[in-house]
Image (tube, grey):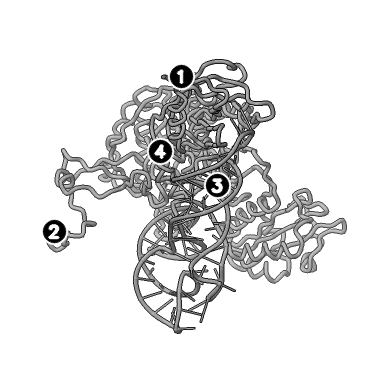
Amino acid sequence: MKRTHTCGELGSDYLGKDVCLQGWVRFSRDHGGILFFDLADAHGITQIVYDPEDVDVGSDRSTLEATLDEFSRESVVSVCGSVRKRVPGTEDGRNPTGEVEVLVQSAEVLSRSKAPPFEIGEQKEHLLPAEDTRLRYRYLDLRRAEMIRTLRFRHRLISLARQFAESKGFLEVETPLLTRSTPEGARDFLVPSRVHPGSFYALPQSPQLFKQMLMVASVDRYFQLARCFRDEDSRADRQPEFTQLDMEMSFVDQEDILETVEGMMSHIWKGLFDEELQTPFPRLRYQEAMARYGTDSPDLRFGLPMVEVTEIVREAPYDIFQRVLSKKGSAICGLNVTASMGAGDLGRNEVDRLITWVKKHGMGGMTWMRMTTEGLESNIVKYFTSEVQEGLVAAMDAAPGDLLLFLAGPKARVLEAGGLLREKLAEDLGLIEEGMHQFLWIVDCPMFEKDPVSGKLTAFHHPFVRPVGDLDDCSIGESYDLCLNGVELGSGSLRNHDVDLQRRILSMLGLSDERMEADFGFFLEALGYGAPPHGGIALGVDRMVSMMLGKESIREVIAFPKNKRMHSPFDGSPTMVDDEKLNELQIISLAMDDIDLDDLE
RNA sequence: GCCCCGGUAGUGUAGUGGCCUAUCAUGUGAGCCUGUCGAGCUUUCGACUCGGGUUCAAAUCCCGGCCGGGGCGCCA
């Protein structure tokens, strides 16, 4: 018998119908005579009942009972019978199919299951098995409704993105996975070439150069759900292979690209949450983000910006500030925890705890004052003239009941610690509204970063970003990062379509002409054959999905992720391979036990 | 490469030097039970990550390895 319905679709409309369901035996309840089974598939759970007094199976009764006796947990079974209303008072309101049950008339075991290593019901998060157990038996873990829901959510996000791209005339183009290894960037995953012994392909860290060449090729709107590979250590939000929603457009300016991305996000939000996103998203210049929030991806679901007050307090005879300010590059920044945020709940003990906390984050301590109707109060306000106090109150917009916190030290350290303190306060005071999503563009990022030790310039984003204005006195690129709730979802930029400008940038990054030719010759050559002005962006799909679903790690939204050590508990990869395979590739592994390095000379 | 946290039946846990022949729950096998729904009841099975050390005595303390997680570095 073929199945006629899924386990999620039967309801009162189907009363009296003969149906056949197939799925997994989730739970069974044997009352001695009457038997209940929860039959589950990816669509839901339907109660199957065997009632010896009600069922009309004639002489097949003992056969049917023998079959039902084989219905062990997670076995795959087929049952046919009629849909009937449950006995009044026994309906299950939590289950969409809870009004009805299927009175079984015939049954078959399609596939037996061993006792599963963990339970597959909808347990609470803290009752889940350890993650490596879940990953080893991922096919069982994925049977859980929560995981099916996640897979479906991700699928819908991707199809909405495709739908939107299609409607805007984007062409989905696949770019190679076997590509050229280039310098800079992350460590490559290398793939040895059998035909060219000693040569290697690299798996793409992103399709950056290919999509730019598609622009040269006149494909003026490209997108791809691109698998990317980076051989760097994992984090909760980083996997060695991940998926980017990659886009590139020609004949556009920055505004066009941001608008397109905002449109796509709105389409996705509408489709998944039935929620209108407010566009355009707020924008913040990189420098301003660093100055006010101490990070390049601030969480704007709450306020609490930092205010630099260095100049206001410079002359105040407060010993701690004076000591800090005597050193060059120092700064004093304040945070105003307002009364409405709950400053009143931060008593002396809580403030002391915060001081201990900031000390762990590189600060010598923290100065604080309270604003009252009488003005500022603290055991140290006596060191500040009324003029300075007024300056602080004005700069920090302090009102009675507010608590002012000050960090002093080397500017970069103050901003970093202040940014972390800001996030800690938001969490402690519950400033983040549940379910809120706050997008933000960070624009005008620097072109270059200087290594503090070697003094060497490196590209802030990548070497293909177009500078704003003239390169020589320009430190800013025409680039943008999309942030959601304080997490970077992706970044993009306008690119250099002028080959000479591109060469100058590569050379500023320390590439000799020879090196440039060797590593990027093919790319520079392409730019020389009529490259249109173009730009684009790449968004992290795994991060987007995990943030939208409030997951702790992107592993939760990837069907078969690697663990922290880049090992796959499911298939056991990576593995050693036979010598035969290595020989064919003319590779000798130094990790092999029987290799004597001296023999290799 | 570094720092932090963890590892006890299949699964989730309790146990911080002797009361451990290791707790509880769930699961597994067996049995009972005619309206349950992560059914209930009885019963069975089943574990201290590995190697050293300290101690009269180690699941418990110390060192190292392995494994897992979080982070720093790294991730243009």
Dots 2, 3 in contact, CB < 8 A: no
Q: Amino acid at mark 3?
A: Asp
Chain letter, disc 2 residue: A
Q: Tag on residue A169?
A: 1
Q: Amino acid at mark 4?
A: Ser
Q: Secondary structure at mark 4?
A: loop
Query: Residue A182, located in which quarter of the rendered image?
Result: top left
**Mark 3 lies on residue:** A296
Marks 4/1: CA distance? 48 Å
Among the two numbered marks 2 and 3 on one chain, the one whose residue lies closer to the N terminus: 3
Residues flagged by tags 1 and 2 on a common chain: yes
Query: Residue A593, located in which quarter of the rendered image?
Result: bottom left
Among the two numbered marks 1 and 3 on one chain, the one whose residue lies closer to the N terminus: 1
Marks 1/3: CA distance? 32 Å
Q: Which of the two discs, 1 and 2, sits closer to the camera?
A: 2
**Mark 2 lies on residue:** A600
**Mark 4 lies on residue:** A113
Question: Is residue A164 something that shows in the picture?
Answer: yes
Q: Secondary structure at mark 1?
A: loop
Residue A539 pos. (x, y %)? 48, 36
Q: Is residue A79 above or below residue A460?
A: above
Among the two numbered marks 3 and 4 on one chain, the one whose residue lies closer to the N terminus: 4
